[in-house]
Image: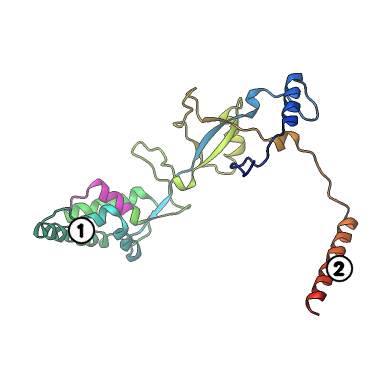
Amino acid sequence: MRKSLGDKRHEISPEQIKQIVEIHRQFREGEHSKIFKREAFGFRKVTIERPLRLNFQANKERLMRLNEQKAFADLAQSKKKAPKERNKEIAEGVKQQKAIFAMLSALPAALFKDRGKFEKELDKAVKVSGFNLSAPLRKAILAALSERDEAAEICRDDEGNPEPDSDLRDTENVPLGEDINAYFDREVKPHVPDAWVNTALRDHKDGEVGKVGYEINFNRYFYKYQPPRPLEEIESDIETLEKEIMGMLSEVTR
């Protein structure tokens, strides 16, 4: 080949092609061939979720993060073309932003490790202020005032189910034919007890949990152990190299 094609860096000669064809035709195991069932190379790629854990605090530093939230920043934006209408809309948006800051500043300064309890305090503040807090703005506030915390309570949806943390999401390749739950209990649960398998992600062909894939790892099946060279031989090579290097240095410094 004139150049490498991705991971393909070696070209098979006509003689090697004939040899491969002959090995396949004979269909028996030997030094250069092994026979496996197709399923031996297959796996199900399952998604492992871990729960979202957040703490909440309405301190000055986190309140300033609210300016970085799009839903909040958009309040002071306008798509009006007429300057007068645009300035009016922006002014109203800035007024709303100040009202939100004032409302949030009245929240308890304590660190909440339970989202449910913090949201109750937020609801009280919203009711007292009389501010109409939209869903996007509420989401922006919760995002700005929260931080990930392994010691915090699990965040749950309206049905009480744990919400997944996308930053902690991982995958596992479960060999075909092996029970996913048994694999999970053996390989995952002992290390991350709060994890679970995302059963909503399924293969588009068979509808089972996990995406089916195949991988042939030649090193795994044809690896041959090569013992390291004797220590005396390595030391001898090092001494030879040292002499060569010293010889080249002596020529440079003459």
Residue at point 35% right, 65% down?
Answer: 61
Dot 2 and dot 1 residues touching (CB under 8 Å): no
Q: Which residue is mark 2?
A: 243
Question: Label 1 amino acid?
Answer: Ala
Q: Is residue 188 left or right of residue 201?
A: right
Q: Nearer the viewer, residue 142 or 39?
A: 39
Please, is residue 55 above or below residue 165 in the view? Answer: below
Q: Looking at this view, name the residue that lies furthest to the top.
A: 26
Residue 42 percent location from the top left of the image:
60, 28
Which mark sits nearer the N-terminus, 2 or 1? 1
Residue at point 18% right, 50% down?
Answer: 132
Residue 52 percent location from the top left of the image:
43, 46
Q: Nearer the viewer, residue 31 or 59?
A: 31
Residue at point 81% right, 75% down?
Answer: 251
Please, is residue 237 above or below residue 116 in the view? Answer: below
Q: Which residue is mark 1?
A: 76
> Looking at the rendering, in which quadrant would you find the C terminus?
bottom right
Q: Secondary structure at mark 1?
A: helix
Q: CA distance from mark 2 to mark 1?
A: 74 Å
Disc number lying in front (2 or 1): 2
Q: Looking at this view, name the residue that lies furthest to the bottom.
A: 254
Q: Secondary structure at mark 2?
A: helix
Circle 1 packing at 10 Å, graded few (<14), some (14-19), many (20+), is some
